[in-house]
């Protein structure tokens, strides 16, 4: 008999591969719910809200596998899990399209000031000359990290007549040519882009990748997007550069600490934000839940898993 704890809001239909499994009990409760007997849990399913710390793992001596219904595993202490022999699996591609589409929507909203205009009209105003925007056509989009999401965003931006410059140490000449993007150093990208978007995981190497020094290399009037992970762009440095007028605006779906509360970046009218919605579509949530539930089932049935 296996016990699976689903500790975050995971699409119920996506859990079907596990629901069909004999000898398995599913508990849908927060890991800090006092009624949950952590010591009896064999598999833990999370999105990003549950922080799977070493301390939590210490309370789960029976745990064999952690399934992350999404891409980033930065909310899981993977080294601690590995030390305890716990396998960590994720769903690497189920939310690619949703996140690329959300990034594109944020970019278009930022450049046309749609959220600000919406609030204004709702307040019974009609300020047509206040909300003059900027076209995407003809602009250079700098993409930092051309993984699955970065590549899907590049395709959409190309369709809008943008030039795409990419910094990605793993980008081959062949792939760049196939996607019609220009490969550049981070420095070249910072110097030449009108809009810069980050699509890397958050790791010790990418934390603060965009900092005061990098911001000082950008063109005056540059825009920034972060729909990947809070912390890749140094938030206080970005706030300084927006405050000085060097950076024209930013669209943020993620923050270093979520929810951000009264954050210095949120006081700027030229910063638009959403509450980590990149993967929040019906399609993506069904995809990632199904993908991760299948992996956990395979593991519990002693079959090889692929996304660990
Ligand atoms: C991910 O890493 O998959 C996304 O940020 C979505 C999420 O956190 O649920």
Image (cartoon, helix red, strand yellow):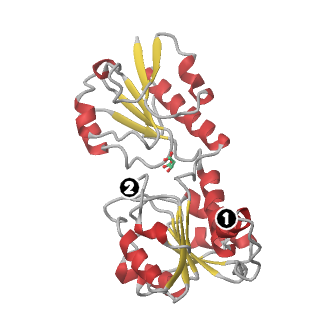
Left or right for 203, reference 70: left
- Res 288 → quadrant: top right
Q: Nearer the viewer, residue 119 or 186?
A: 119
* Disc 1 to disc 2, C-alpha distance: 26 Å
Quarter of the image for the N terminus: give it: top left
Mark 1 lies on residue = 119
Q: Residue at x 35, y 19 (%)?
A: 35
Is the residue indicated by label 2 positioned so its CB lies within 8 Å of ligand 1? Answer: no
The numbered disc on residue 95 is: none
Left or right for 100, reference 160: left
Q: Residue at x 35, y 59 (%)?
A: 203
Q: Nearer the viewer, residue 54 or 276?
A: 276
Mark 2 lies on residue = 257
Q: Nearer the viewer, residue 164 or 256?
A: 256
Q: Residue at x 63, y 71 (%)?
A: 110
Left or right for 278, reference 51: right
Question: How far from the left and from the top, in percent, is residue 267?
Answer: 47, 70
Question: How far from the left and from the top, in percent, is residue 174?
Answer: 59, 70
Q: Is residue 146 above or below residue 79?
A: below
Q: Nearer the viewer, residue 88 or 259?
A: 259
- Res 87 → quadrant: top left
Kind of element beneath mark 1? helix
Q: Is residue 294 above or below residue 268?
A: above
Is the residue indicated by label 1 positioned so its CB lies within 8 Å of ligand 1? Answer: no
Question: How far from the left and from the top, in percent, is residue 131?
Answer: 70, 78
């Amino acid at each position: 008999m296996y016990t699976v704890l689903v500790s975050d809001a995971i699409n119920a239909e996506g859990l079907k591969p596990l629901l069909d499994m004999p000898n398995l009990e599913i508990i849908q409760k927060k890991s800090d719910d006092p009624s949950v007997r952590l010591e009896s849990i064999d598999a833990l399913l999370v999105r990003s809200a549950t922080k799977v710390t070493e301390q939590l793992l210490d309370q789960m001596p029976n745990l064999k596998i952690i399934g992350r219904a999404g891409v980033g595993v930065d909310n899981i202490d993977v080294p601690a899990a590995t030390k305890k022999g716990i396998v960590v699996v994720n769903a690497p591609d189920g939310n690619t399209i949703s996140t690329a589409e959300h990034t594109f929507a944020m970019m278009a909203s930022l450049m046309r000031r749609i959220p600000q205009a919406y609030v204004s009209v709702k307040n019974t105003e009609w300020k047509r000359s206040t909300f003059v925007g900027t076209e995407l056509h003809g602009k250079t989009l700098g993409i930092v990290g051309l993984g699955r999401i970065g590549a899907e965003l590049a395709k959409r931006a190309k369709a809008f007549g943008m030039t795409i410059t990419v910094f990605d140490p793993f980008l081959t000449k062949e792939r760049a040519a196939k996607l019609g993007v220009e490969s550049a150093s981070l420095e070249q990208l910072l110097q030449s882009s009108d809009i810069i978007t980050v699509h890397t995981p958050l790791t010790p190497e990418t934390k603060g990748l965009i900092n005061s020094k990098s911001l000082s290399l950008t063109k005056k009037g540059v825009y920034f997007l972060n729909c990947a992970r809070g912390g890749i762009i140094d938030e206080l440095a970005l706030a300084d550069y927006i405050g000085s007028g060097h950076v024209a605006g930013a669209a943020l779906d993620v923050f270093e600490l979520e929810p951000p509360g009264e954050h210095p970046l949120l006081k700027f009218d030229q910063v638009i934000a959403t509450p980590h919605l990149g993967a929040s579509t019906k399609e993506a949530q069904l995809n990632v839940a199904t993908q991760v539930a299948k992996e956990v089932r395979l593991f519990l049935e002693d079959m090889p898993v692929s996304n660990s």
